[in-house]
Amino acid sequence: MKLRLIALLFPLCVFLGCHTVDDDRIPYSPVMIRFSTQSMWETYGVKGALDYQRFIINDNIPSNFPYTALSYTGFGGVLLCGDIHGNPVAYDLSCPVERSRTVRIIIDETASNAYCSKCGSVYDVFSNFGVPLSGEASRLGYGLRRYDVTSGTQGDFKVITN
């Protein structure tokens, strides 16, 4: 019985293990968003689960964020989210199907995911690391480009290129 179960599950595991998500479709662009104080994080960062903030230096988003000469916000901007556990995660805002700086994903607060208004692709940004859920991105296996969020010893946070 055990051997028969293994024989049935092995092809399924091989099939599922081969499915990968391509999260390198967006061209490399530097990212450096620094929150130098806890107060700055509380003002511009994410406060917990399902919270989000967009950073687009060329459009001055968020307004009044203290960007510096060393600040960079990726290819199409940065989406900073609080995942379902409240941990910060970050993605490039550009849709990997469209590969354009100006075609950016949008958060759908009612569905707790993100979507591209041009191609219709839907992405899981709060619990599954930017993987495509539906649309052209799902069909092609294109996920969102992720960036690292690190915390320093003095309570500061950085979103950086990984």
Image (cartoon, grey):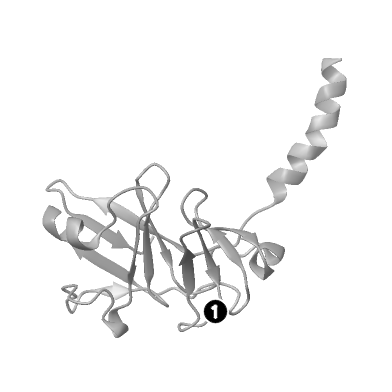
| Residue closest to the eye, 83 or 108 | 108
Q: Is residue 115 above or below residue 110?
A: below
* 69 to the left or right of 12: left
Q: Label 1 crowding class (10 Å Cα cut-off): few <14, some 14-19, many 20+?
A: some
Q: Is residue 34 above or below residue 94?
A: above
| Residue closest to the eye, 88 or 34 | 88
Q: Is residue 13 above or below residue 147?
A: above
Q: Is residue 42 above or below residue 93?
A: above
* 61 to the left or right of 153: right
The outermost residue toward the top is: 1
- Count how many numbered circles sit on residues in the image: 1
Observer able to see residue 37:
no
Quarter location, residue 122: bottom right
Quarter location, residue 90: bottom left
The outermost residue toward the front is: 110
Helix, strand or loop for disc 1: loop
Observer able to see residue 123:
yes
| Residue at the (42%, 77%) spot, across then down | 76
Horizontal and vertical percent for residue 18?
71, 49
Considering the image in quadrants, where does the N terminus appear?
Answer: top right
Considering the image in quadrants, where does the C terminus appear?
Answer: bottom left
Residue identifier under label 1: 99
| Residue at the (18%, 79%) spot, across then down | 69
Horizontal and vertical percent for residue 132?
60, 60
Three-letter amino acid code at disc 1? Arg
| Residue at the (79%, 31%) spot, across then down | 9
Horizontal and vertical percent for residue 49?
37, 48
Horizontal and vertical percent for residue 29?
39, 75
